[in-house]
Amino acid sequence: MAREFTSVGVVGLGTMGAGIVEVFARNGIQVVAVEISEGALERGRTTLTGSTDRAVAKGKLDPADRDALLSRVTFAVGLDALHSVDLVIEAVPEHLDLKQRIFAELDRVCKPEAILATNTSSLSVTEISVATTRPNQVIGIHFFNPAPVMKLVEVVRTVVTSADVVADVETLCTRLGKVDVTINDRAGFIANALLFGYLNHAVGMFESHYASREDIDAAMKLGCGLPMGPLALMDLIGLDTAYEILDTMYRRGGRDRRHAPVPLIKQMVTAGLLGRKSGRGFYTYERPGSPVVVPDEATPVATEAALADGARAITKVGVVGSGTMATGIIEVFAKAGYEVVSVTRGAEKSATVCDAVKTSLTKGVVRGKLSEDDRDAALGRITWSATLDHLADVDLVVEAVVEELSVKKALFASLDEICKPGVVLATTTSSLPVIDVAMATQRPADVVGLHFFNPAPIMPLVEVVRTIRTSPETTATARAVCAALGKTAVVCGDRSGFIVNALLFPYLNDAVKMLEASYSTADDIDHAMKLGCGYPMGPFELLDVVGLDVSLAIQRELYLELREPGFAPAPLLEHLVTAGYLGRKTGRGFRDHTHR
């Protein structure tokens, strides 16, 4: 039988601690909430009452239930108040010496059978436990912020944590309505180990002026469906907290360069730019603690005039290719009112693309998103062709052929001969260097990357990739076209993976390495990222959808360009691809899809 927890102590009543108090009190458990001083205690009380009052205002908590919840909480200064509780959770700042001092004191104060838990997100639970005479009763219970809302709890056992203690805590998590994943004591556990490498990489992109803060954040929200962009998330977490977590993970986790904090983070912390809590981080906020972003000197001017500045007029567009991407791009341009010339290799492929576009537009009519007249008008704007010569009078060409550099270079050399001067030549490549394609022409200033996301009619993001030879007019034209299509354009340099893939695929690769090291299961890692970070899909779900072969090819490109050891493809990923386990398309990847 699992033990019955009737009273729980919480040490530290910051945002996290106050949230943990609320979780326990909501579930009928008596809580002793402890702080170091009367002032800190009062701030904690204010945080708790503010949270419960908001829940009442939103209709998520009955006023009587709120009053009952608050009646279960006893506030006290000093650890002596915890002498009779069954479990203590410590939620003080991430400093090992501070936590060790608290645990030594808890060991003296608490009854012998009490479980002592830490909410640390990055420090060694083992190192904390040795400050006590009962390391077998010390465990990590890592809640996510905001604790009353977030479903995930990472239960962290050390090599000496008793199996009974682990089982009791798992049962308690279920009682609290949480989903627990139980793991061993390793730097960053699951969620932070995967999340912070990605956040650090995003800061590095910003620091090197590769893309603006707005474009990096928009790319990850719109391209990956993430709830927040990485820089906005850093501001929410707090740059000082993020620095401590990265620094700890770098020192404890084998000194992986991906976790070495980007210098800009330390500089911002030193300057007091800590994110939302200080009113300024990567963005500027209305006031300290406010989530409302206000314009500052770095905010781009997004007027129509600014977008169109230097842009060339585009009325007729050529699309070369016959795959899913080409089909989607034809539909997007035709629906937006452009004349479109579709060029494929042969009449048979043209007929296939024509049928696919008609089917997709008709689906739009059936779903009520398009009128029959609009569908017919869109189809009327498309000319179907099997020869590149029909692109002689277009203003923009979008290439969407196979991802092979030799094929793209040959195509661009032909377009260079056929197209009139001043035409913008765009490639939809997601992984190849745009400059290589541009230099196959005599007009590299007119060549740009226009990376649409699949499915193009639905996905709102386009990465506009400028090479060192792309002219400002060409970039302005590409941005203006994206705006006319109703898409969000993000501008970046010509580096492997651009923004989205360069940030997404190393994170996926890290997840594979975590699985390969037998640290956790694919299910638990997916749970951790969906429930702990709000991701729409877990890394292994996403890998199986994207295709393991595609993922491996992108990861190899990133590694070849950056030569960063942490970017080397995980051997397990290579082995699965060699074995033909490519994901959903073959029925098996990280999971078996044949019976689903």
Image (spheres, rainbow, N blue to C red):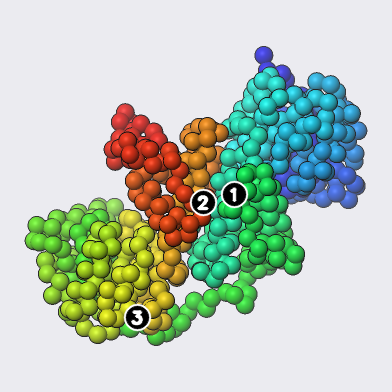
* 374 and 43: which is toward the camera: 43
Label 2 sits on residue? 565
Q: What SS does tag 2 mark?
A: helix
**Residue located 88% across and 34% down the image:** 105
Point out the image quarter for the N terminus: top right
Mark pair 3, 2: CA separation: 34 Å
Left or right: 542 as drawn, with respect to 296: left
Label 3 sits on residue? 445
Q: Where is residue 271 shown, x and y percent of the image?
A: 74, 67
- Disc 1 marks which amino acid? Asp
Q: Quadrant of residue 387?
A: bottom left
Closer to the N terminus: mark 3 or mark 2?
A: 3
Between marks 3 and 2 in the image, the one whose residue lies nearer the viewer: 2
Residue at the limit of the structure toward the left, as seen here: 347
Q: Give yes or no for contact between labels 3 and 1 (Cβ–Cβ under 8 Å).
A: no
Left or right: 357 as drawn, with respect to 95: left
Q: Quadrant of residue 79?
A: top right
Mark number, residue 256: 1
Q: Give yes or no for contact between labels 1 and 2 (Cβ–Cβ under 8 Å).
A: yes
**Residue located 32% across and 64% down the image:** 428
Mark pair 3, 1: CA separation: 39 Å
Q: Is residue 11 above or below residue 486?
A: above
Closer to the N terminus: mark 3 or mark 1?
A: 1
Mark pair 1, 2: CA separation: 8 Å
- Disc 2 marks which amino acid? Pro
